[in-house]
């Protein structure tokens, strides 16, 4: 158990003060011990994974931070599928790369997403038309309500667009220790997203392989600074800071009319079909049309020069600066389109550092 460990170096955004107490967790037994230790002292608990989807307060965390580092990958065949169980502390993109190299379909469009395996069910991580929920079989987790390891089947996870029971109804109840996925042996890649399809078509990849699809996704993400690269200051972020809003058909028509007033062409506003007759909008498009183009600068933070949806630490930035810019963007989009953007990262620490309070 360590004291006063700075958390900023463990995050992709590079902000955050110290943890009062800090411990690395390498197995379920150590996890249970850490939970019990914090309870005996009446301390709040926070589990830190890859740090790619968190904004940690400048004052740090006043309790115990458990850094998830449970490793291990096991695979077994089941018919034409392969079941892969991975520890929550495994690097997500390394797992994707290994699966693609083994000819296993199901992860290829999720290439380049930073973070650990344990985070994928929480957000129902998705990109380029593919989501975690498509391949997830079950989640192994420590249930803080019963103090035991449990298995949560996919059908019990309540998956939605960037949502799950772990993020909403049971937020704070479970600590994920492992995830099992079902991949397809020698399966075709999932080419559903128009941007990905255009990119592959332009390169003559009519029936791309899994490896070609992965390379294409990595290229497209890198163009938007959505692949962590120490040489690229635009990638010092949590990726997409806001979730693409999903609206009703009636709201969509109202927003299209507003887009027509601003641009003269309502069809210029990107939109995508969503379940139950709803429509998904592009948060990045709304942000830019609300007056926040790529490369906005606010002190030590700003928006990426490659993608307006990424708020970046330009060097020496603080959590408060990040939050202030996020609030400014939220207010601008609300005023321009009457659309409320929902932040994607988890906010950790003092209440006054969080948005929407």
Image (cartoon, rainbow, N blue to C red):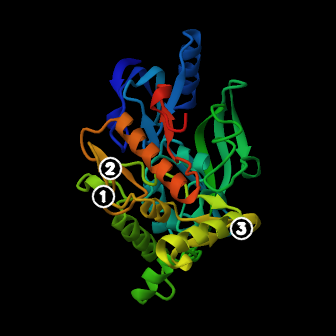
Q: Quick one: SS at disc 1?
A: loop
Q: Is residue 104 left or right of residue 296?
A: right
**On-image quarter of the N terminus:** top left
Quarter of the view holding residue 9: top left
Report the front residue among 147 and 185. 147
Q: Earlier in the sequence, mark 2 or mark 1?
A: 1
CA–CA distance in space, label 2 to label 3: 33 Å
Q: Residues within 10 Å of mark 2 (few under 14, many from 20)?
A: many
Res. 83 visible in picture: no
Nearest the viewer among 272 and 20 is: 272
In-image side of 26 versus 301 (left or right):
right
Q: Which residue is mark 1?
A: 295
Compared with 190, 305 (above or below) is above
Tell me which label, 3 or 1, sits earlier in the chain: 3
Q: Could you tell me which secondary element the residue under label 3 belongs to?
A: helix
Circle 3 residue = 249
Horizontally, residue 259 falls left or right of residue 54, namely right
């Amino acid at each position: 158990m360590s004291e006063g460990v700075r958390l900023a170096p463990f995050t992709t955004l590079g902000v955050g003060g110290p943890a009062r107490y800090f411990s690395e967790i390498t197995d379920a037994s150590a996890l249970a011990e850490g939970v019990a230790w914090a309870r005996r002292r009446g301390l709040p608990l926070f589990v830190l994974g890859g740090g790619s989807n968190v904004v940690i307060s400048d004052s740090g965390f006043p309790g115990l931070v458990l850094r998830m580092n449970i490793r291990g990958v096991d695979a077994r065949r089941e018919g034409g599928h392969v079941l892969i169980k991975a520890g929550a502390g495994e690097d997500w993109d390394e797992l994707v790369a290994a699966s693609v190299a083994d000819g296993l379909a199901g992860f290829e469009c999720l290439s380049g997403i930073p973070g650990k395996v344990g985070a994928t069910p929480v957000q129902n991580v998705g990109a380029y038309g593919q989501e975690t929920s498509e391949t997830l079989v079950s989640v192994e987790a420590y249930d803080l309500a019963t103090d035991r390891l449990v298995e949560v089947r996919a059908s019990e996870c309540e998956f939605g667009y960037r949502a799950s029971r772990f993020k909403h109804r049971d937020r704070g109840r479970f600590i994920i220790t492992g995830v099992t996925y079902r991949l397809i042996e020698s399966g075709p890649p999932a080419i559903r997203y128009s941007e990905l399809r255009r990119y592959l078509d332009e390169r003559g990849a009519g029936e791309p392989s899994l490896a070609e699809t992965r390379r294409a996704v990595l290229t497209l993400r890198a163009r938007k600074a959505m692949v962590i690269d120490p040489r690229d200051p635009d990638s010092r972020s949590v990726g997409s800071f806001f979730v693409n809003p999903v609206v009703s058909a009636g709201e969509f028509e109202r927003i299209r009319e507003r887009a027509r007033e601003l641009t003269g062409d309502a069809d210029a506003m990107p939109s995508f079909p969503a379940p139950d007759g709803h429509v998904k909008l592009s948060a990045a498009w709304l942000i830019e049309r609300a007056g926040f183009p790529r490369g906005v600068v606010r002190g030590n933070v700003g928006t990426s020069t490659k993608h307006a949806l990424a708020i970046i630490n330009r060097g020496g930035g603080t959590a408060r600066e990040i939050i202030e810019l996020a609030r400014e963007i939220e207010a601008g989009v609300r005023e321009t389109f009457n659309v409320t953007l929902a932040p994607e990262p988890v906010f950790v620490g003092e209440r006054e550092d969080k948005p929407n309070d």
